[in-house]
Amino acid sequence: MCVDLGLWFKSSTNYPDDFRVFCDAQYLELLQNVNIKWLSLELAVNHVLRLYKHLSIYFKSTDEKQGRGVRLRARFEDPMTEVHLLFYQALLPGFVEINQIFQRQDPCVHLLHDQIRSFIYMLMLKFLKPETFKETSPEKVSYQDEENQLPDSELDLGLTTKAALKKLNEAAEINLSNVSEFYKAARSFLRKATEFAVTKLPLNDPLLSHAVFVDFKKRLDCRLDDVLYFVRRYNHLLPFNDPKEQDNIGDEFLNYQAVEECEIPPAVWKDALVRQSDDGVSCSEHHRMDIIWAFLSDFRSGITDNLRFPRLMKVAQLVLCLPHSNADAERSFSLISHNKTDTRNRLSLEGTLSSVMCIKMSNIEPCFKYEPPAEMVRNSKFAAAVYNKKHPGKEA
C-alpha cells in the first residue's frame, strides 16, 4: 500500500493542491522504497495515518481504472485498513529499534545478546501470558500453544488500535466477524514474528554472551571465563595460552572490575555518549565502548606507572573489531552501485573507483558539507601554482 501510494503520487500530475505536501521528495522517497528500505516503513505508515482522512476522501472520489488506483481505492473503502495501519504503528518501533542496532557503525557486538532477548520478550509480552516465559529461555517457550496465549481482549495491540476497532464496531461499520478476523490475523502476525526471531536470530551464540565483558557498565556481572573464551577461540591472534599469561589476564580482569566509574574522566564519557545514529536519526542513548577502552588502554598504575590492562586490552580490541552484522558490507555494495553506473561503467576498481570509495567511506557526511582545512587549501594553491609554472599554457 505504501509503495502504491508513493508511485501513484510520483506518476500522477493531476493530484489536488491539498496533496502537494504529500508529494514532498523526502516522503515520496520513503513511501516508494519501503520494500527495500525497511527502516523507512515506520515513517511511511506514520505519514499515511497523518493524512489518512484526506487520502480516504480523495481515493473514494476517483474513478481511476488503472490497477494501482483500483487497489488504493479498495484499500481506503475498507474501514479495517486504518486499524491495520494503527496496529503496525504500535508494533513497528520495536522492530526499528532492533534493526538500528544491526545498522549501527560503532562496535556493538557486546550489546546483541541482551538486545535480541529483549526484542523476543517484547514480542511475547504482546500475546503470551507472562508466567509462560518469566523464567524460561525464549527457545523453550511454547508460544504456539493456545493455552499459553492471552485472550483477544488482553492482546497488546496498542490503545489507539483498540479504540479505533471499538469505534468502528459501535458505528456498525464493521461487525463482530471483522473484529474476530482482525484479532486472529494480529495473533498470527505476532506468532510468526516470534517464530522468525527465535529461529533466525543468534540467541545462544556463545560469542555474543561472552562479549558482554567489554561493556564497562556490566563488568561486575561478567567472569574471567568470558575473557578466556576469546583467548581459546582466537589463539592465533591472542598468544596467551600459557598458564602464567592466563593468570596475568585473571589479575587484570579483577583489576578491571575494581575500576570505579569516576576514575574515567567526564570528558571521556562525554566523547563516548551517542544520542543519535549515524544517519542522524534519534536513538536510545548509549556509550561507545571503543572510546572507553581507548582510554583504558593507557590506564596506568599510580605506583609503578605500568599499564594496568596490557593483555586484557588486546582481547577487548579483538572483540570490538568483530562485525555485529553485514550492514557495513551492504553499505559498500550500495556505494559501488551508486558510483559505478551505466554511464560510468569504465571506472576501474584498482583506480578511480577505489579512490572514490576510500574517500566516501572515510567521511560519512555529504561532500557539500565538507570544509577543507586552511592548510590543505594553501597546499592545493601552491601545488597549482607550481604546476602552472612548469607547464605554461596548461593551467591546472
Image (spheres, rainbow, N blue to C red):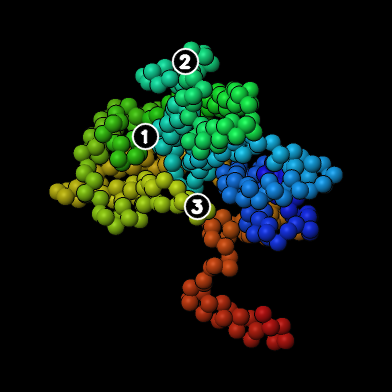
Residue 128 position (above or below residue 108): above
Horizontal side of residue 262 vs 120, given as left or right: left
| Amino acid at dot 2 | Asn
Q: In the orientation shown, which residue stands out farthest toward the right?
A: 65
Q: CA distance from mark 2 to mark 3?
A: 37 Å
Disc 3 to disc 1, C-alpha distance: 26 Å
Q: Position of residue 92 (x, y in %)?
A: 54, 38
**Residue type pointed to by label 1:** Val
Q: Residues within 10 Å of mark 1 (few under 14, many from 20)?
A: many
Is tag 1's residue or tag 2's residue first in the polypeptide sequence? 2
Q: On the image, numbered disc 3 is attached to which residue?
A: 281
How crowded pointer 3 is (Cα within 10 Å; few <14, some 14-19, many 20+) is rated as: few
Which label is found at residue 148?
2
The residue located at (35%, 39%) in the rendering is 214
Q: Residue at x 50, y 43 (%)?
A: 100
Where disc 2 sits, the SS reads: helix
- Between 300 and 1, the one lying in front of the other is 1
Q: Secondary structure at mark 3?
A: loop
Residue 374: x %, y % from top left: 48, 77
Q: CA distance from mark 1 to mark 2?
A: 32 Å
Q: Most extreme residue toward the front, as rendered?
A: 171
Q: Amino acid at mark 3?
A: Val
User: Residue 126: image x %, image y %?
Assistant: 47, 27
Q: Nearer the viewer, residue 156 or 62?
A: 62
Q: Secondary structure at mark 1?
A: helix
Q: Which of the marked residues, 2 or 3, is nearer the chain's N terminus?
A: 2
Does residue 275 show up? Answer: yes
**Quadrant of the image containing the N terminus:** top right
Mark 2 or mark 3: which is in front?
2
> Hey, which quadrant is residue 109 in on the image?
top left
Residue on which disc 1 sits: 212
